[in-house]
C-alpha cells in the first residue's frame, strides 16, 4: 500500500512538471495569429520528431496509467477500511472538500483527458477525422486544429470549466505528494502549501483562459 | 434544558444496529456530555429498559477511553477535545444530538457505542516500546537530549490512543496514531537501537489490521485531543522509506 502511495505521489509530481511545460507551450497561442501559427506548428513538429520527447511521451502515458490504476486500487482498499458511513458527517469542519474528494476530481480529470486526447491526439497522431493540411512552412497545421476547436463555444466552456476540478486536484495533490514522500520540514510545508495554491491557480487560470482568448481572437 | 438524543443501539458485533431516539428534559447546561448520558441511563433503569453502553475512564481528558461521534464530529463539535470535556452548554435547548460509535473496519462495535480498539494495541506490540532493560529511574542528565528533540518527542508521546484520528479519517487510516508512536521513540537515543525495525513492523501491522492509507485530508489533526500534528505522518513516511531502502 505504501509502495503504491509513493508511486501515486511520484507520478503525480511528474504530471505536475508536465503541466508546466504544456501551459508554457499553450502560451504561444496568445501571440498574433501569423506568428502563433508558425511557432506553434514548428514547435509541434519538433516534438513529434524528437526521440527524447518520444521517450518522455511514453513515460507520460505510463505515469497517467500508474497514477490512475494505483489510485483506484488504494481507493477501493480505503473504502473497505470504513465499514459503515456515519449518518451525519460534518467533514467540512475539519478538512477541505477537495481533499475529501480527490477520487471524484480524478475521475472528472480523466474524462477530460479522454476528450482532450480525442480532440488532438487522435486527430494529429492517429489521423482520425478530417484531414489536417500543412502550413506555409510544410509543418502539420496543428494551430488550425486548435483554433478551429475553440471556435465552438461548447468546447470553450468544456475546456474552461473542467480546469476548476484540475486546480482543486492539483492544490491538494501537490502538497500531499511531498508529504507522502516524506517531506516534513515545518516551515517548508507552510511554503509548500502556498506554492501549491499558487501553482494550482496559475494552471487553472492559464489553461482555462486560453480557449476563451482563441474564441474571441 | 431539553434535548433529543438519537443514539446508535446495537446488541453485539453480530447483530445489526439502528438509531433510537430518547427525549431528556431535566438536563442543565453545566452537565458534561457523559453526565447527560449517565442521566439518560438512570431514566432507562427506572423504565426497566436496557442502558446505553458507552466507554469512559478518567473523565479528565487524559486517558483516551471516551470515544463518541457526536453530530458528525469525532468527540463532538469542538476541535482538539475529548468527549468527556464536552459540556451540554455546547448544544442548543431542544436540539437533536446524534451519537454514533466510531466507524472503522478495524474498530468493530462491541455493544451500542463501545468499540474494540485492540487493533491499536497490536500496532504497539510490534515495537511501540524499547527492548533495553532500563532498571530504576536513571539520573536525569545521564543521556543528554537537546530541548528541541525532547519537545518533539514529548509532543508525539502525548497521543492518548483514543482513535479519533481513525474515526474522522475518510479512509479510517491509523497513520497519525502510528506515526506519533514511532516518532516519539525514534527521535530519542533510547529508541535508536530498534529504529528501523520499529517503523517497518508497526507500519506493516497498521496495514494488516485493515486501516486505510493516509491521503492528508488533515481531519485527524483537527480532531486529535492532543494536537498531534499531521507532519508526524510525513516524518513516518521518510523513516519508512529510509528503513526500507537504505538500511
Image (cartoon, coloured by chain):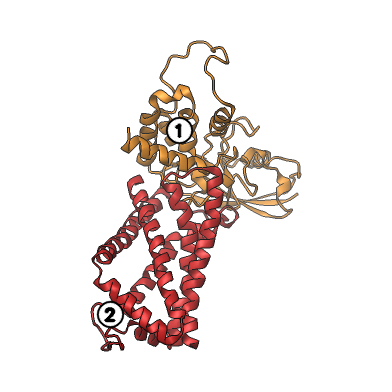
Chain colours: A red, B orange
Residue B2: x, y in percent?
Answer: 73, 51
Q: In the figure, is residue A167 to the left or right of B7?
A: left
| Residue B182 circle label | 1
Is residue A89 something that shows in the picture? no
Q: In the figure, is residue A168 to the left or right of A17?
A: right
Q: Looking at the image, which is closer to me, A86 or A9?
A: A9
| Residue A202 circle label | none
Is residue A91 something that shows in the picture? yes
Q: In the figure, is residue B68 to the left or right of B91?
A: left
Q: In the figure, is residue A131 to the left or right of B106?
A: left
Give how far apart the Cα atoms at labels 2 and 1 are.
53 Å
Q: Secondary structure at mark 1?
A: helix
Decide: is A147 above or below A21: below
Q: Secondary structure at mark 2?
A: helix
Q: Chain letter of disc 1?
A: B
> Which of the 4 image quarters holds residue B140?
top right
Tag 2–tag 1 contact (CB < 8 Å): no
- Marker count (numbered): 2
Q: Residue drawn 39% across and 85% down?
A: A149
Residue B1: x, y in percent?
Answer: 75, 49
Q: Residue drawn 40% across and 51% down?
A: A78
| Residue that carries the numbered disc 2 in the rendered image | A124
The lab-note entry on whether marks 2 and 1 share a chain reads no
Amino acid at each position: 500500500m505504501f509502495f503504491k502511495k509513493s508511486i501515486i505521489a511520484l507520478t503525480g509530481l511528474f504530471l505536475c512538471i508536465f503541466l508546466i511545460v504544456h501551459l508554457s507551450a499553450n502560451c504561444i497561442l496568445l501571440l498574433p495569429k501569423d506568428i502563433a501559427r508558425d511557432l506553434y506548428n514548428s514547435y509541434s513538429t519538433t516534438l513529434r520528431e524528437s526521440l527524447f520527447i518520444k521517450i518522455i511521451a511514453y513515460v507520460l502515458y505510463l505515469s497517467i496509467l500508474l497514477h490512475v490504476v494505483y489510485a483506484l486500487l488504494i481507493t477501493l482498499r480505503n473504502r473497505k477500511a470504513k465499514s459503515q458511513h456515519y449518518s451525519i458527517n460534518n467533514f467540512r469542519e475539519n478538512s477541505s472538500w477537495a481533499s475529501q474528494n480527490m477520487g471524484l476530481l480524478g475521475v472528472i480529470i480523466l474524462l477530460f483527458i479522454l476528450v482532450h486526447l480525442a480532440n488532438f491526439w487522435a486527430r494529429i497522431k492517429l489521423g482520425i477525422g478530417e484531414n489536417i493540411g500543412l502550413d506555409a512552412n510544410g509543418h502539420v497545421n496543428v494551430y488550425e486544429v486548435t483554433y478551429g476547436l475553440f471556435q465552438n463555444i461548447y468546447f470553450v466552456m468544456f475546456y474552461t470549466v473542467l480546469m476548476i476540478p484540475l486546480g482543486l486536484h492539483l492544490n491538494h495533490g501537490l502538497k500531499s505528494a511531498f508529504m507522502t514522500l516524506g517531506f516534513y520540514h515545518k516551515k517548508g510545508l507552510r511554503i509548500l502549501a502556498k506554492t501549491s495554491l499558487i501553482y494550482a491557480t496559475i494552471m487553472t487560470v492559464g489553461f482555462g483562459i486560453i480557449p476563451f482568448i482563441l474564441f474571441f481572437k | 434544558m431539553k434535548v433529543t438524543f438519537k443514539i446508535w443501539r446495537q446488541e453485539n458485533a453480530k447483530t445489526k444496529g439502528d438509531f433510537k431516539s430518547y427525549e431528556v428534559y431535566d438536563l442543565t447546561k453545566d452537565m458534561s456530555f457523559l453526565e447527560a448520558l449517565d442521566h439518560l441511563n438512570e431514566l432507562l433503569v427506572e423504565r426497566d429498559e436496557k442502558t446505553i453502553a458507552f466507554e469512559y475512564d478518567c473523565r479528565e481528558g487524559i486517558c483516551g477511553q471516551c470515544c463518541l461521534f457526536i453530530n458528525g464530529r469525532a468527540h463532538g463539535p469542538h476541535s482538539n477535545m475529548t468527549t468527556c470535556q464536552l459540556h451540554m452548554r455546547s448544544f442548543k435547548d431542544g436540539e437533536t444530538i446524534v451519537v454514533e460509535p466510531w466507524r472503522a473496519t478495524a474498530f468493530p462495535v462491541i455493544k451500542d457505542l463501545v468499540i474494540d480498539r485492540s487493533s491499536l494495541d497490536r500496532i504497539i506490540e510490534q515495537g511501540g516500546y524499547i527492548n533495553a532493560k532500563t532498571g530504576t529511574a536513571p539520573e536525569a542528565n545521564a543521556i543528554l537530549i537537546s530541548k528541541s528533540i525532547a519537545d518533539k518527542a514529548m509532543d508525539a508521546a502525548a497521543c492518548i490512543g483514543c482513535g479519533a484520528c481513525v474515526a474522522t479519517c475518510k479512509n479510517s487510516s491509523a497513520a497519525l496514531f502510528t506515526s506519533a508512536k514511532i516518532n516519539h521513540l525514534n527521535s530519542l537515543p533510547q529508541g535508536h537501537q530498534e529504529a528501523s525495525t520499529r517503523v517497518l513492523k508497526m507500519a506493516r501491522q497498521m496495514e494488516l489490521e485493515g486501516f486505510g492509507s493516509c491521503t492528508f485530508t488533515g481531519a485527524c489533526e483537527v480532531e486529535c485531543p492532543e494536537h498531534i500534528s499531521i507532519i508526524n505522518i510525513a516524518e513516518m513516511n521518510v523513516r519508512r522509506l529510509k528503513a526500507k531502502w537504505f538500511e
